[in-house]
Image (tube, rainbow, N blue to C red):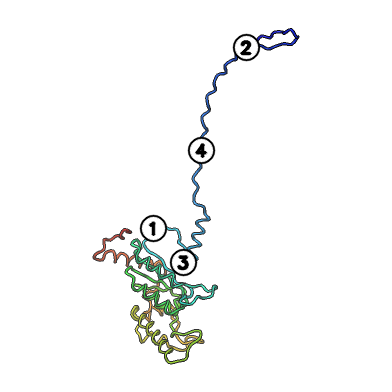
Amino acid sequence: MANKKSGSGNFTVTPGPVPTIPAVPAAEPATLPAAPQREAPETSKKEAALETLETLGQLNIPAGKMNIQTLTIIGQIEGHLVLPPQNKTTKYEHIIPQLVAIEENKEIEGLLVILNTVGGDVEAGLAIAEMLASMSKPTVSLVLGGGHSIGVPIAVSTDYSYIVETATMTIHPLRLTGLVIGVPQTYEYLDKMQDRVVRFVTAHSRVSEAKFRELMFRTGELARDIGTIVVGTDAVKYGLIDEIGGLAKAVSKLYELVEVKRAAPGNSGQPEEVR
């Protein structure tokens, strides 16, 4: 580029050729590594478990694939009236839909019923017992701690029953709580309800009606009531329960009944596919 001096004493700049700048290749777009897949948050799993606990009163324990289902009857059996919140209860409106689902599920081949109950609503307890007795799948019951009052029909409603040596079963006449109308019809209704319990127990166990009524109306066994407290070995001796045993025996017997049902004519030997 040349500089020329003008007459005024100032310098002027004469433009020269513009140098060419080589083109810079465009940079390729940067690629970010893919974000790792996150597992389901533990909070959602806990919320689902708590929801199941609040709704059905039980948790789905993670385990391998099994073909038997467990049902627990604990605390007081709640019927038409809602018990106080501090009471541990088994709600029959939760148990009955579960029994229907177990009956319809083709992958479930047997049901284990575990009882530790003080009894409760008679009609609700009989409804659960009738549902268990009418199931087509093998059922086994196990009495732990206690199977008192209306828990007795539930314990004997299965195909086979067990009781541990330390468990007890209280057999007593039916009682009414709250306001009772003192008319003959009330006592007639109570007698008919009691006959329903007696007929059910004697039809689903080896105890005779005479022996069961004797245990029911025996005096002197309880301090402020009439009836009989039957310990584990006595329950087997009287014919209420089939055998003394715990969890291992109950599960083994249930699998044995499942195998017998598989080998029955008309069964393929394997659980049917879910449709």
Does 97 appear above or below 27? below
Q: Is residue 213 left or right of residue 222?
A: left
- Residue found farthest to the left: 265
Tell me which amino acid carries mark 4: Pro
Residue corresponding to mark 3: 56
1 vs 3, front mark = 3
Tell me which amino acid carries mark 1: Lys
| Most foreground residue, 188 or 135 | 188
Residue corresponding to mark 1: 65
Residue corresponding to mark 4: 33
Residue corresponding to mark 2: 16
Decide if residue 132 is in sight here. yes
| Real-space Cα separation, disc 1 to disc 2, in angstroms | 87 Å
- Give the image quarter of residue 153: bottom left
Of labels 2 and 4, earlier in sequence is: 2
Image coordinates for residue 80, horizontal then vertical, percent = 46, 77
Image coordinates for residue 16, horizontal then vertical, percent = 62, 11
Of labels 2 and 3, earlier in sequence is: 2
| Real-space Cα separation, disc 1 to disc 4, in angstroms | 38 Å
Tell me which amino acid carries mark 2: Gly
| Real-space Cα separation, disc 2 to disc 3, in angstroms | 91 Å
Of labels 1 and 3, earlier in sequence is: 3
